[in-house]
Structure formats: C-alpha cells, structure tokens
Amino acid sequence: MGYKVTLIPGDGIGPEVTNAAVRIVNASGVKIDWERFAAGAEAYAKFGEYIPKELTHSIESTGLGLKGPVTTPIGGGFSSINVALRKQFELFANFRPIRNLPSLPTRYPSVDLAICRENTEGQYSGIEHEVVPGVVESLKIITEKASTRIARFAFEYARREKRKRIHAIHKANIMKMSDGLFLRCCREVAKEYPEITYGEHIIDNTCMQLVMNPYQYDVLVMENLYGDIISDLCAAFVGGLGLVPGANIGTRCAIFEAVHGSAPDIAGKDIANPTAVLQSAVLMLRHMGEVEAADKVHAALEKTYKEKLHLTRDVGGTAGTSEFADAVIANMEHVAVATGD
C-alpha cells in the first residue's frame, strides 16, 4: 500500500537536503507519493499567501508532512511558518530525541534524551500589543487542556519506550499561576504512571544541570519557550542542530522537520548536511508504522557515520549532499542483506 506525504522543501538549503532525504526514503522500499508545496516568501511571491490553501488542503488530506527549513524574518516581516503550521493543525507536541551518532566526537558521548515541548501556547501564542508608546505587552497563555495533553504525551512515550524518568521543567517559583498550573497538570498525569519516576526542575537550574551532567535526565516535558531553548541546548551535546530531528504531532496530523536554519550562504553548493531532515524522515516512518524501513534507514545512516568516508564538511568530511545520500543508500542495501541473513 502506498502513502501520500506532503513535502515542503523550504528555502535556502532546504530543497537540497529534503531531496536527499526523499531519495533515501524512496530507496527504503516504502512507496510514497510526495505532494510538493512551497511555503514562506517563495509561496507569497507565487500565490500571495505564505501558507497556500493548496498546502493546507494537502496536509489535511495526507495527515503527514516532511518539511525543510523555511527562513523566518527577524524583527519584522511575516510570522514564523513553523509556528503558524503548528497552530493551524494543532500540532500540540514537539518531540525531539537527542542521541549521538557513531564516530562523531562530542563533549558528551552516549547522550540519550527525549524532549517533549508543548507546541501551541505559552509565549508563542503571539498575543502582543503596544500599551503606550515605548511599552509592549506580550501575554503568556497556559491552559489546563494543553498542559495535560503534553504531559500525557510525554508519559505515554516514556511508557511505550520503557523510559524510567520524567522531569517537568518550569519557573513556578516566579510565575506561580501559569507555570503552577502546568505543574499541577503534570502531577495529576504522573499519578497514572507509577512505574515512571517523576521530578520537577526549575528552568534556569535545568540549563546548568544539563551542561554539568546531561546523563541525569531521561525525558523532559515543558511549555513552549522553555522547550525551544532547551532543545537547542541539548542539540549541542550531539553535534548541533544540523544533526537532530524534530516532530510536530497532533491528533489528526503530524509534520516532521529539520530544526536548523536555511543557511542561504551555502544554498545551491551541494555541501549541506541532510542528516537532520533524514532523521526527521525516520521519525515519520516510525509514526507511519513502517518500523522496518525506519530501522533500515537509521542503520544505514549510522553505518555511513561509522565509516567516515562520505561525510559532509560540517562533520569533518569532504563529501557533498548528493554523495552523502548516495552513501546512505548504498549502505542501506548492505544493511538489508545483513538483515535478510
């Protein structure tokens, strides 16, 4: 049976890295009909909309999306396409696993963390206004519904994957009502999962503790802004944003995306590393139930890193984007033969 997946290549290096990921996923044997759509400035230039109606209809129909980086203007221009898509399709859970790739030296080997970030409210509600000239107010929205939902997502993930600990990350010592509500919801959900150890850490202390000893954490659940900061911090443990996957999961739809920038300075040069979007595609395959294909792609990716023969420049190699993808595809064939034996 074939699948339909909405593909948003993005801009900058987006088309290059997503094309590489698509080639690798297609080589896994899973039959996918990719529906390609532009978003952001490119879409506005063509259609007068940053998120075209055709893109919206495609995601509603397929329920699945794979997305490359889309440039977000700073301090002006259009709003973040990432945030807009998360709100539009109520993709309430941002999930980022943080794991080392083999043979890639980092300060912290063998890190294995999972970050579950509430994706629809908090400071990212985008409710801002100017009170008087020179004074701007931005509202942080925390609801029982959203807090309970992300807590349950984190605990269900922990139970399914046999993870041992969950920490709720907060600033309830200062924001006693908003973060206090978030904590109360997490505590109530935690009672339903007695096999999982539950703890709470303040956000600033968590940053210090992570840098001192990331191994003390297992699964972290938090509201939107804290999750944005912590997930980038943790990506540094394993080599940076160019290597880690991201998933935005809702009740009806899920969009999987590279979380790094669009790097326009190297666009079109065939030197960008497609690992992040490829790892996001692996998460997508697992979400689809195509576990064998996901395992095959991930094993081939790890084999490529172990061999060190076809790595891109950002991780110490000399290969281009296309050569890296070719190597993963070739290694996938070897992995498939080994699995068949």
Image (spheres, helix red, strand yellow):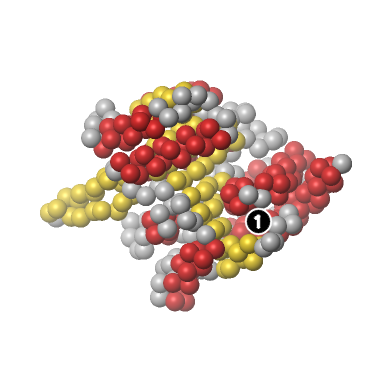
Left of 324 or right of it: where is 202? left
Q: For this rendering, which residue is in front, 193 or 93? A: 193
Q: For this rendering, which residue is in front, 229 or 151? A: 151
Q: Tell me what residue is drawn at x 43 percent, y 67 percent.
A: 51
Q: Residue furthest left?
A: 132
Name above or below for residue 307 compared with residue 89: above
Q: Position of residue 144 (x, y in %)?
A: 30, 41
Q: Tell me what residue is drawn at x 40 percent, y 72 percent.
A: 49
Which of the image's four quarters has the N terminus? bottom right
Left of 86 or right of it: where is 300? right
Q: Tell me what residue is drawn at x 31 percent, y 51 percent.
A: 125
In which image quadrant can residue 80 be found? bottom left
- Circle 1 is placed at which residue position? 21
Count of numbered badges drawn on the protein: 1
Left of 119 or right of it: where is 292? right
Q: Amino acid at mark 1?
A: Ala
Q: Position of residue 208 (x, y in %)?
A: 42, 26
Tell me, yes or no, if residue 199 can be seen here: yes
Determine whether the residue tagged by mark 1 lies in a helix, strand or loop.
helix
In which image quadrant can residue 143 be found? top left
Tell me, yes or no, if residue 83 can be seen here: no
Q: Residue furthest right?
A: 341
Q: Position of residue 118 (x, y in %)?
A: 40, 43
**Few, some or many residues within 10 Å of mark 1 (<14, 14–19, 20+):** many
Name above or below for residue 105 compared with residue 330: above
Q: Position of residue 81 (x, y in %)?
A: 42, 60
Name above or below for residue 50 compared with residue 23: below
Which of the image's four quarters has the C terminus? top right
Q: Tell me what residue is drawn at x 47 percent, y 34 percent.
A: 155
